[in-house]
Image (cartoon, rainbow, N blue to C red):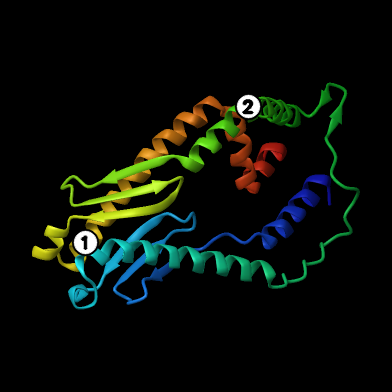
Amino acid sequence: MDQWDELRRLQREADSLVHEPRPAIGADDTGTVEVRVDGTGRIDAVEVHRDWRRRLSPEAVGPAVLAATGNALTKQATALAEAALRPSPPPRPPAEVPGPPPSPHLSRDGPDPRLHELLVTVTDAIGELHAYTEHMAAVATRTTIGRTRSGRVTVTFTGRHLTAVEIDFRWLGAEADGRQIADEVEAACREAYRVIATEDEAAAARTPHLTAVRDLARNPREFLRRITGD
């Protein structure tokens, strides 16, 4: 087993210890509104019971969406914490006795160019930390508005968290059914996420090396590919 085989084995063991957040579904106290969040905590589906008028007043629909979202995020965080506390299965023994820990390949021409390139990227990323810190501080308090084309639903995000849902009461009281309400809320959230993504992409363009390092940290397999060439 050479040093790269050993590195791959260690990577497989590390992967077995990583617990990724999974999608979760939450509901308000009445069970009228359900919200599904994806693995990143973004709202990707909303359901409103067809008999919502028997359970909620028009004024209570927006708060119910907030409550359902909060419930989904709580379930997601709880599941992640429980997964982290569960004992991991013992690692499989290697097929061969491993050799010495992997070390950078040295040759007459100097260090492996792949490792040199990675080192340069990390060094440049450190220089971009100040700009990134400023961006993250701004993100935490940033207010983003998402509004549907009809103007019936407006959502507010503080940072990346949904903090307000406003729905046209006259529309709710006159004609809106559950599916229409859900569609409008989803559309408003998509618009807010589009604005957030545009701002994040602009910030990432100012810190390209730090973004590259963060992407590698989120994708260990890509990190392994970068240094082994596989």
- Residue at the spot of label 1: 181
Query: Which residue is found at the position 86% from the left and 30% from the top?
Result: 106
How far from the left and from the top, in percent, is residue 26? 41, 69
Q: Residue furthest top?
A: 109
How far from the left and from the top, in percent, is residue 75? 50, 69
Q: Is residue 158 left or right of residue 85?
A: left
- In front: 199, or 145? 145
Query: Which residue is found at the position 82% from the left and 62% from the top?
Result: 94
For residue 230, which numbered disc appears in the image? none
- Quadrant of the drawing holding the C terminus: top right
Q: How many marks?
A: 2
SS class, disc 2: loop
Query: Does the CB distance between marks 2 and 1 fall below 8 Å?
Result: no
Q: CA distance from mark 2 to mark 1?
A: 43 Å
Give the quarter of the image for residue 25.
bottom left
Q: Is residue 18 above or below residue 205?
A: below
Res 23 visible:
no
Neighbor class of circle 2 (other Cα within 10 Å; few <14, some 14-19, many 20+) is: some
Q: Amino acid at mark 1?
A: Ile
Q: Is residue 85 left or right of residue 165?
A: right
Q: Amino acid at mark 2?
A: Glu
How far from the left and from the top, in percent, is residue 164? 34, 53
- Residue at the spot of label 2: 128
SS class, disc 1: helix
Query: Which residue is found at the position 65% from the left and 29% from the top?
Result: 125
- In front: 230, or 125? 125
Q: Is residue 187 above or below residue 83?
A: above
How far from the left and from the top, in percent, is residue 221? 64, 48
Res 146 visible:
yes
Query: Which residue is found at the position 32% from the left and 66% from the top?
Result: 64
- In front: 87, or 63? 63
